Amino acid sequence: MRPPDRSIEQALIGWLPRQRWFAGKGRPITGVRIVTGTELTAPAAGSAAGGPGLRHTLVEVSQDGDRDIYQLLLGFRDHLPDRLRYAEILASDGTHVYDAVHDPELTAVLLRNIAAQAEVHPLSFHRVPGATIETELTSLVSSAEQSNTSLVFGETYIYKMFRRITPGVNPDLELNLALTRAGSVHIPRLHGWAEMRLGDDVATVGMLSEFLRTATDGWQLATTSVRDLYASDPLVPAEQAGGDFAGEAERLGTATAQVHRDLAEAFGVRRVPPQALRETAARMVEHLDAACADVPELAEYAEAIKAAYRELAELQRPVSVQRIHGDYHLGQVLRTERGWVLLDFEGEPARTPAERQAPAHPLRDVAGMLRSFEYAARFLLAGHREPVSGPREDSGQAMLLEGRAREWADRNRTAFCRGYALGGGPDPDAHRVLLRAFELDKAVYEVRYEARNRPSWLHVPLGTLPHLTR
Ligand SMILES: Nc1ncnc2c1ncn2[C@@H]1O[C@H](COP(=O)(O)OP(=O)(O)O)[C@@H](O)[C@H]1O
Ligand SMILES: O=P(O)(O)O[C@H]1O[C@H](CO)[C@@H](O[C@H]2O[C@H](CO)[C@@H](O)[C@H](O)[C@H]2O)[C@H](O)[C@H]1O
């Protein structure tokens, strides 16, 4: 017999904070309520009766007066095989309740439903016109560090199951659909999606795309290049050291500009008066104040950061805004045989849905990627922080590597901006005040993000601030 909902809700209070994708870490959960439960198991032909059950579930999680909705796939079995033990959430009344994303026997229904454009009220599954979907593939949970959960089917598809559900079309799907219609080569091919009714609205719950099997992500490529530079003879300049990334950085800049152009064509461009920049600067000050309250180490840079925001507020020119990526960094781009491909148009996970969808200046994305170059250059310095106060030769080594990090970040920054301008984007060199303010705002976001999610990384964005606030 299946345990009652209230036992499952109780078990989820302990289980949710342990999940990588759970956005509310560090804040006590005061309640979990199952909002919807939809039976999804449609046993494949030939499978045994009485097999495992799958229930698509939305839960409302209360924390500090906030209520967020999360999506779960709950599996139910009388006997839980050893291979699924680690996914168990609760065992009660002879039934095991577990995280069914790890059970390919159950997740197969997602592919079948998308292929069939099934309606399983309140869920509905959609296939992109012209797509044919192979339904006999089995899934594995992607091992990528993610805010959501992705299932890789065979080596063919990737189904991104959005974890935090908000009413409306998810911007990731919205922008992927628009770029698909524009014929962009800079996104994975979109095959389908799943959505559900949520009150009076519809909410996107999943997206099925081409899995780019042979791709390497930008972070991996960039940090390999940084490693090569650190290991090379200090007298050899970056362009001559092995694994130089500048060519890739330039091509990435061009691909970024092309995606911005397609988004501008699909969603339009709006001219906003100088007043809008004053409002943007005021919001940046709010972000900064909130971040300083959370992370006291930020306070020593606050004055210099505010000075940069004042310069932004004083700009007397209108600017053009449009839909952009919104959370652009090296982990969101894949180097493939057909060039750079962009992923994850959801915007920053910590922002509200309205903020994520608001048109913004495209240099915000450029700033995001430039910050990522700083991260890639500096994160390997972690192991070299101690020696700074150690013996003199170690401290000399640390300074040398700091210099190498600067060289790498500057070189790739220049290359990316060149590629971006060549691709038709607004020239970053001609908008220095704007770009600097965006970089600082992103750095502030990152300090807060790391403090909350990966405290051992906090030194990375903090370590970039002396240079950025000079
Ligand atoms: N189409 C794809 N092909 C290959 N790998 C992918 C694809 N989509 C995503 N990935 C991998 O999964 C990771 C997380 O994807 P992403 O969409 O950014 O998820 P999240 O929003 O949950 O962080 C990416 O960094 C990439 O390594
Ligand atoms: O990829 P997500 O949408 O989950 O974005 C969040 O997590 C990112 C880290 O996984 C975080 O990115 C920061 O760390 C990256 C290195 O891991 C670095 O390349 C980025 O420049 C840096 O911002 C991102 O900010 C956050 O929203």
Image (cartoon, rainbow, N blue to C red):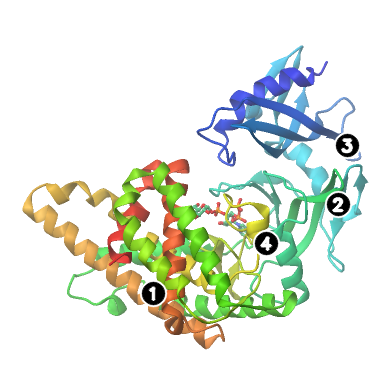
For label 2, the crowd category at 10 Å Cα-Cα, with few meaning under 14, some 14 to 19 and many 20 or more, is many
Mark 3–mark 4 distance (CA, rounded to whole Å): 39 Å
Residue at the spot x=31%, y=79% of the render?
A: 239
Q: Amino acid at mark 1?
A: Asn
Q: Are marks 4 and 1 in contact (CB under 8 Å)?
A: no
Compared across the picture, whether 402 is left or right of 57 comes to: left
Q: Which residue is identified by label 1?
A: 412
For label 4, the crowd category at 10 Å Cα-Cα, with few meaning under 14, some 14 to 19 and many 20 or more, is many
Counting residues from the N terminus, which is met first, the one under dot 2 or under dot 3?
3
Compared across the picture, whether 29 is left or right of 166 comes to: left
Counting residues from the N terminus, which is met first, the one under dot 4 or under dot 2?
2
For label 3, the crowd category at 10 Å Cα-Cα, with few meaning under 14, some 14 to 19 and many 20 or more, is some
Q: Which residue is identified by label 3?
A: 43
Say which mark, if any, is on residue 357: 4
The mark total stands at 4
Say which mark, if any, is on residue 125: 2
Residue at the spot x=24%, y=77% of the render?
A: 237
Q: Amino acid at mark 3?
A: Pro
